Amino acid sequence: MAIEHIVLIEFKDGTTDAERAQTQTILTELKDKIPGIEAMRVGLNFSERAGKIELAAAMTMTDRAVLDSYGPHEAHQAAIKQFGGFVENLTVVDFEY
């Protein structure tokens, strides 16, 4: 079974387009830095249907062990330090399939 890890981000008021794009790039690059991430899709929301959610990331991971190691992984922690100051709210969903 694979794991789908979905992250939905609401940015703080005043976050620039450049900061949003930087966050998208930082998240996309995690695929090459964390073993076990099979696919990474990251995009900025363009519709009004998602409320304040402005960015979504969907990662396919090989198994729960990868998900368990993802949070504390040094590349993930470094990413959070880079864009965490822009984030107002973060929603995470994980499921197996």
Image (spheres, rainbow, N blue to C red):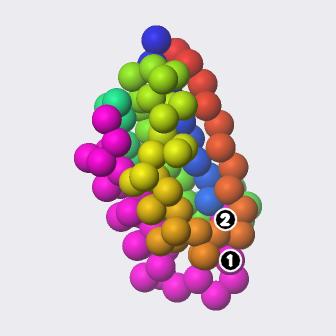
* Location of residue 66 with respect to 84 vertically, above or below: above
- The answer to whether 75 is drawn above or below residue 18 in the figure is above
Foreground pick, 51 / 33: 33
Q: How far across and how far down the image is residue 24, in percent? A: 42, 63
Q: Nearer the viewer, residue 71 or 6?
A: 71
Q: In this view, does 47 lie to the left or right of 25?
A: right
> Where residue 7 sits: x, y (%)?
58, 48
Which residue in the structure is indicated by mark 2? 10
Q: Which residue is drawn at 64% across and 69% down?
A: 87
Q: Give the range drawn in magenta.
A: 10-35
Of the pair 3 and 70, the residue shown nearer to us? 70
31 in the magenta segment:
yes
Q: Residue shown at 36%/64% (left/top)?
A: 25
In space, the residues marked 2 and 1 are separated at their CA atoms by 7 Å
Helix, strand, or loop for circle 2?
A: strand
Q: Label 2 neighbourhood size at 10 Å, few (<14), some (14-19), many (20+)?
A: some
Q: What residue type is labelled 2?
A: Glu
Main secondary structure of the magenta stretch: helix
Q: Percent position (x, y) of residue 85?
A: 61, 76
Residue 92 seen in render: yes
Q: Mark 1 is on which residue type?
A: Lys
**Whole-percent x, y for residue 50 in the image:** 68, 56
User: Would residue 11 be counted in the magenta stretch?
Assistant: yes
Badge 1 marks a residue whose secondary structure is loop
The residue identified by callout 1 is 12
